[in-house]
Amino acid sequence: MVRIVDVAKMANVSTATVSRVISNTGSVKSGTAEKVLEAIQKLNYQPNLLARQLRRLETKTILVVVPDITNTFFSNVLRGIEAIASEHGYQVLLGDTENIVERESGYLTIIRQKKADGMILLTARSSQNLLEEIAQEYPVVLACEYIEGSKLPTVSIDNISSARKAADYLIGLGHKRIAHISGPLGVVVGRDRLRGFQQAMIQNGLTVEPFLVQEGDFTFESGFNLMMKFLALEHPPTAVFAANDEMAIGAVKAIKSKRLKVPEDISVVGFDDIKFASVFEPAITTIAQPTFELGKIAMELLLKLMNNDELEKKQYMLEDKLVVRESCKALEREM
Amino acid sequence: MVRIVDVAKMANVSTATVSRVISNTGSVKSGTAEKVLEAIQKLNYQPNLLARQLRRLETKTILVVVPDITNTFFSNVLRGIEAIASEHGYQVLLGDTENIVERESGYLTIIRQKKADGMILLTARSSQNLLEEIAQEYPVVLACEYIEGSKLPTVSIDNISSARKAADYLIGLGHKRIAHISGPLGVVVGRDRLRGFQQAMIQNGLTVEPFLVQEGDFTFESGFNLMMKFLALEHPPTAVFAANDEMAIGAVKAIKSKRLKVPEDISVVGFDDIKFASVFEPAITTIAQPTFELGKIAMELLLKLMNNDELEKKQYMLEDKLVVRESCKALEREM
DNA sequence: GAAGTTATTGTAACCGATTACATTTCAGTG
DNA sequence: CACTGAAATGTAATCGGTTACAATAACTTC
């Protein structure tokens, strides 16, 4: 391995000078700099980052914890994060919890071990205490999911109002028996989207039938299975709001498996606007979150935290929008 | 920040003893160990990994470079890698090139800077020389894509024979005018799948019409656009083999946009078996690669390389299989 | 109880860079 | 030409652990 001393020796200078040339700090005569650069070239020298980082006590790495990297929603947020990160010379270490809660806390220790300068959580399901404790000491930003009553810096959409928007849309189309396939209720987004759904129903004078709210786990399969439950009813709902697109697509598949049609027989609304939502047939009407933007702002926030800059604002709520496609239809007949 | 000396002081021992307790090496009296552990607890001490790694000259981190993390094919391979990696105490640093070739070489320097002990490339599009040079000095494993004539440790399927298998299937169904939407021909997988297609055609006495082979770039959009070109022909092909599922789905969408049906009017075969291939309608007939397994074996290979173990075998070819679903149909009438 | 082992603990060098501080070089000035 | 201040360079401490080696303690054996 080529070390800085090897370069120094070859160029006939001290390691300090080499270091100065590399990092472009301090003053070095142009002649000397040339000699050094030449030696670096010749030896194909690459500074050992571990050593540098140890000395500077920073890693120029941030950790991003994702619940499911397979989901394009998260990978798109990730891209927003990466764009800003690399702009500022930061590398992104990815942690995929695969929806296993325990893995999350595993990743929390990475930051305590100084393998990363900060972290962005796209999932926050582990104990709030642990999280707040870590956030006291290290720069942490929550994106997409937030924790009620917590003062952690957060970037997200307003899941309650978004869900309300989705339900309002169905109600506006004349639907009255509307079912909801929720996300896991142990997770804030799951609860919030349910709450938004309930608010919309109540505000419009509709009742939320307990059986028409079923708890899913954000997977395609759960969407399929829960929809099958609804379909087994004597009077199935005329519309379904699923808490994410994967479950919405699962629901559509279930409906089709019963030889019913979407949207003619049953309308379906999803959430997230994953890539596939527009490709699927029928194309899924859904709530689009500004994924890239979410990632971008989260990273910018984290940069400020790591710099100890003053934050004008700690919680950001971004605008989502309802993307109307083909999976919903106005209710004509009574069921 | 709590350092090892703080623990040592509190427990009234030397740093060496503390270190021994932490890493469970050497002998320490159980009484002393207890004192140390207590101090660690009390101070909430976490060893600084940078320092440890610098001393040990290892990072316990591997780098995985992916062309597109949004593609479930790659994220599934990644899961295989992660499973084995974490089993052995390794962390996975993810690099997403977003299909930009230059980014790949950017990631290559990470390993030279000792930020990772080894790397697995799920894409190998940059200069072969650079790659071989790096591989001389550092542990590198290629997965999914391989480089012709290179002696790098590789795990992949046999793209040529797989593509032949796909084409043979269409030929077996009676198709004669078969088109191919290839991957980028600058990439080995792209070339190999094309070659397999050509071999199958020729072996079955069919001609490969030049216009019926179009070069795509693995995106949904390119599949759509190229299929539109085929559809503009006076005699469109009766079957299409796309070099990946995204393009296959794009092709199906194009076909449907012309009010034609899959598979009744045109049969389509994809490649990779991404999650969505089975959900899409019609469900796409495709070549399934053992993704998890690919990742697993790649990581096992890398572990051996990093350990300087003898490799019994450097190139692994895994079995793929043709998954027959709904997107193909036997040709009945002549077109 | 002395000699010989073995178990336990401590001291200090080391990993490879960065950087505060010290020293040398050099240009400019009176 | 001596003097001054700035520029260029060097020396050595430092980051926070690990570990080779040295020193000490504890235990056997005769």
Image (cartoon, coloured by chain):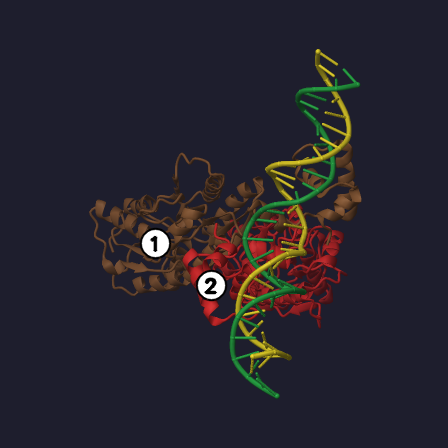
Chain colours: A red, B brown, C green, D yellow
Q: Mark 1 lies on which chain?
A: B
Q: Do the residues at discs 2 and 1 belong to one chain? A: no
Circle 2 residues within 10 Å: few <14, some 14–19, many ≥20: many
Q: Name the residue under label 2.
A: A36
Q: Which of marks 2 and 1 is in front?
A: 2
Can you tell which quarter of the image residue A23 is in?
A: bottom right
> In which quadrant of the rendered image does the C terminus of chain B lie?
bottom left
**Numbered label tally:** 2
Give the vertical position of A323 relative to A70 (above or below): below
Q: Which mark is residue B190?
A: 1
Residue A76 shown left or right of residue A35 in the figure: right
Name the kind of residue labelled 1 in the image: Gly
Q: Residues within 10 Å of mark 1 (few under 14, many from 20)?
A: many
Task: Give the x, y percent position of residue B263.
Answer: 36, 52
Look at the image and tell me in which quarter the N terminus of chain B lies.
bottom right
Looking at the image, residue A168 lies above or below residue B291? below
Describe residue B160's horizontal placement relative to residue A264 as left or right. left
Left or right relative to B164: residue A249: right
Q: In the image, residue B131 lies at what x, y percent? A: 39, 52
Using the rendered image of the protein, determine whether residue A270 is visible from the camera's viewpoint: no
Indicate the position of residue B208 as horizontal and vertical percent values.
23, 54
State the CA–CA distance, disc 2 to disc 1.
Answer: 43 Å
The amino acid type found where label 2 is placed reads Val
Image point 67% across, 51% down: which residue? A108
Q: In this view, does B13 lie to the left or right of A36?
A: right
Callout 2: chain: A
Along the viewing direction, whichever of C27 and B291 lies nearer the viewer: C27
Identify the secondary structure beneath mark 2: helix
